[in-house]
Image (cartoon, helix red, strand yellow):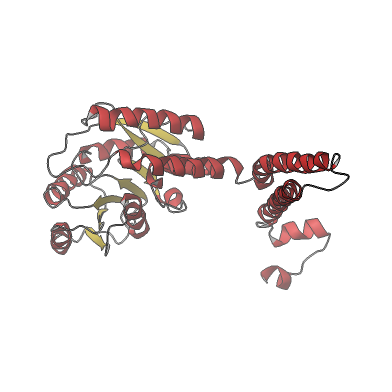
Amino acid sequence: MDSFPKLSVIVPFYNEEDSIKPMHAAIVAAVDPLRIPYEMVFVDDGSKDATAAMADEIARGDPRVRFVKFRRNYGQTAAMAAGIEYARGEILVTMDGDLQNDPADIEHFLTKMAEGNDIVVGWRHKRQDKLISRKIPSVIANRLISRVTGVSITDNGCSLKAFRASVIKKIPLYSEMHRFIPAMASIAGPRIAEIKVRHHARQFGASKYGLSRVYKVLLDLMVIKTVSSFTSRPLLWFSLLCLPLMLVGLAALAGGLLAAIPENGRLSLPLTGAGIVFLTGAVTLIASGTLGELIYKLGDVRPEHFARLTGRVLSSNETRK
């Protein structure tokens, strides 16, 4: 095996002792005929069954397998992030470990990547899941995500995706962020494509997903919207946040002043105090936005840029410092 494989197949597992060996065999059967150097990165997300032991056994028998083991269950995104960090390939393919994704589709992803795309997303067009608990929430979530982020992806929840390592390794992942990778990467302007993939019914074990994840997805969606829309314009974001405080503060202060008229100039302490507190909060947010704007604008100023801004001509020694 090459020390620097072209392809890394990343698979997180959690309590998938019946699926891990068939998954390994399916990946080998799908990728071996492509005749490219590759590796598999298996990540055990704190499984409570024999998944970790089986993954370790597979890794000992196949030098193409790298095994990462978590001490406890951290979630799919953390497992994906660990696999991405340890992967050494130029192209990274992620997929679920429950045999619902088909490794035979990897060839189509590589073909699409060869066309110049940076991210290729799978679309489970014939999804083999329960209608009420999985399909309907997924359709609603995908439409909401596309509307909020402006990145039109049919199936954000499909784990079968391909990335250029140079793109994905720069994207921070946490919480349930693995489903938002295309939206987060869109800030850097990558080429994103989508292809139809096969999807199989679960053969072993029980699904680890459910409606309980909805609130996490909604919170992460708010974070993505904030990052994608206001990263380069922090002053605008803080200004929008301070508007409600400013309006409430002005209303409370005006109420306090008006209440003083019939009281012979005696201000209403609760109203006036609340107004001052809210207005102080609004000023603080504006100041924070201004500071953020300065950090963003000047954070990437290189020596030659600084020279143009200040009118100084830096010597070679100053430039190196």
Left or right of 176 in this view: 125: left
> Front-most of 216 and 292?
216
Left or right of 272 in this view: 180: left
Q: Position of residue 188 (x, y in %)?
A: 53, 44
Q: How many marks?
A: 0
- Relative to 192, does residue 163 appear above or below in the rendering? below
Q: Is residue 118 visible?
A: no
The residue positioned 15% from the left and 64% from the top of the image is 60
Q: Position of residue 176 (x, y in %)?
A: 38, 46
The residue positioned 88% from the left and 44% from the top of the image is 264
Classify the position of the N terminus by image quarter.
bottom left
Left or right of 180 in this view: 209: left
Residue placed farthest to the front in the image?
263
The residue positioned 43% from the left and 53% from the top of the image is 169
Q: Position of residue 73 (x, y in %)?
A: 28, 57
> Front-most of 237 and 68?
237
Classify the position of the C terminus by image quarter.
bottom right
Q: Is residue 25 visible?
A: yes
- Relative to 220, does residue 143 appear above or below in the rendering? above
> Front-most of 115 and 171?
171
The residue positioned 25% from the left and 36% from the top of the image is 105
**In which image quadrant can residue 302 be found?**
bottom right
